[in-house]
Image (spheres, helix red, strand yellow):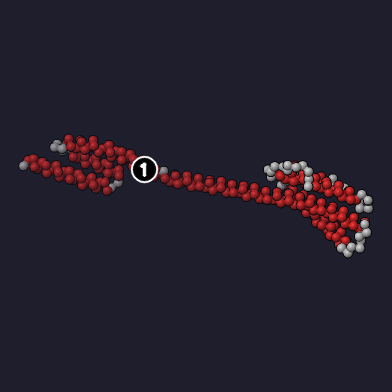
Amino acid sequence: MRVTMCSVGIITRIHLGYIRLHKVMNSAAGLFVIGWKLVLAIIAGSSVVTTCGVWLLARFTSVFDAYAGERAKLMAQFHNLDKLVASTERLTATTETIKAEIQHKVWETQTTLTLKRDIYTRLLESIGQMIEDQQDSKYLETMHQRGFDDVPDLADWQRQSADRLRVTMQKWNRAVDVAPILISDAAYAILPKVFFGLLRVDFNSPTFPQQCDLNIEHLKRCRYDLQQAARADFGMTKYAFDKPL
């Protein structure tokens, strides 16, 4: 009867300890570990189950300590979450700033290349138009001196040629005004040579056709040199031939 009552007491204590443990497990994780150790201490305090209590304490204490350590690590990570979010936001802002700067540089580079190509195009087209004007002047004056004045359209052709030359010079001058801020120094150095090397054609001289031809060859050479300089400015290879068209 004494053994039975003792067993009942032990079972009751274990059951009460289990109930306490269950309640502690439903509470915060830190209280769970403390409650478990407290239950083990209560059980181990019994004279009958001391050995059992010691064994349980040795068996599960290391497990709970490991759990508590891992939980502490996780809690530290959660505490650092705000810092991580702030760092991510700063990184995102920095990335967007760099992205915007790169896009601006790309836009600026593309715009500069477009303007540069436009200036080179206008300069080269103007030289090409000058060559055509010289050819027209030579042809029309030759017709005039050979007695083709009776051609109804001859006077109009000469007037149109003079008008084209005036427009060409206007385009040339506007392109030259902008050229220094866009084209290379080598290319810009060619521009003054275009007019410095031109002859003033004397249409009353019998050699005016030769004078026009010299001007045409000079303009072609200037156009060729400017084309080569433009290709170098754009990072392209130079022409394989050295004779202007």
- Is 243 placed left or right of 201 in the picture? left
Q: Is residue 216 visible?
A: yes
Measuring 26% from the left and 41% from the top, which residue is drawn there?
34
Nearer to me, 58 or 40: 58
Q: How many marks?
A: 1
Q: Residue at x 87, y 47 (%)?
A: 199
- Please indicate, yes or no, whether residue 159 appears anywhere in the rendered image: no
Task: Give the camera-side residue of 158 and 17.
Answer: 158
| Residue plotted at (83% across, 47% down) | 217
Residue 93, x across and y down, in percent: 52, 47
Whole-percent x, y for residue 80 in the image: 41, 43
Q: Quadrant of residue 44?
A: top left
Front position in the image: 238 or 193: 238
Residue 215 lies left or right of residue 85; in this view the side is right
140 sits left or right of 231 in the view: right
The reply, left or right, for residue 26 in relation to residue 168 is: left
Name the residue carrying label 1: 74
The percent position of residue 189, horizontal first and vertical second, equals 78, 43
| Residue visible at 13% across and 37% down in the picture | 48
